[in-house]
Amino acid sequence: MDLVIFLPLLIIMGAFMFFASRRQKKAMQATIDLHNSLKIGDRIHTTSGLQGTITRITDDYIDLEIAPGVVTTWMKLAVRDRIESDVDEGNDELTEHTNDTDGYKND
């Protein structure tokens, strides 16, 4: 009788653990793919929030230019994501503000 009560609970907990580990494996693989695809000239964010441009890449480290002439060395593991250029979005925002007569967005 006790086994019948705990069996559904054990099944639910097993399913939760399975899906949680699967999600974690996917996130880890995405991070590995990002680190392998980095190249010189990419703009990135670090895990601490610093933005920079990659100037040199080795197996475990990258050099980031964080200001003109200021280069720092970071572990590749500190790279959180790549900054995609938002040139088109910036132009759309400029167009929206230019079309308004009072300078504010009208929702």
Image: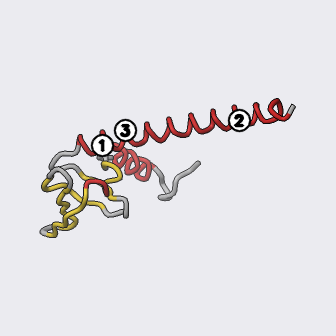
**CA–CA distance between discs 1 and 2?**
36 Å
Circle 2 Cα neighbour tier, 10 Å, few/some/many (<14 / 14–19 / ≥20): few
Callout 1 environment at 10 Å: few (<14), some (14 to 19), or many (20+)? some
Q: Could you tell which of marks 1 and 3 lies nearer the N-terminus?
A: 3
Task: Please name the residue shown 78% across and 36% down the image.
Answer: 6
Above or below, 4 against 84 in this view is above
Mark 3–mark 2 Cα distance, whole angstroms, equals 29 Å
**Considering the numbered disc 3 on the image, is that residue within a helix, a strand or a loop?**
helix
At 51% across and 39% down in the image, what residue appears?
21
Q: How many marks?
A: 3
- Marks 1 and 3, how far apart in space? 9 Å
Q: Pointers 3 and 2 in contact (CB under 8 A)?
A: no
| Point 30% across, 54% down: residue | 77
Residue position marked by numbered label 3 in the rendering: 29
Amino acid under label 2?
A: Leu
Residue behind mark 2: 10
Quadrant of the image occupied by residue 79: bottom left
Point out the frontmost of discs 3 and 2.
2
Q: Using the image, tell me which numbered label, if any, was put on residue 34.
A: 1
Q: Position of residue 41 (x, y in %)?
A: 16, 50
Question: How are the colours assigned in the image?
Answer: secondary structure
Q: Name the amino acid, label 3.
A: Gln
Compared to residue 87, the image places residue 71 above or below, namely: below
In the figure, residue 26 lies in which quadrant?
top left
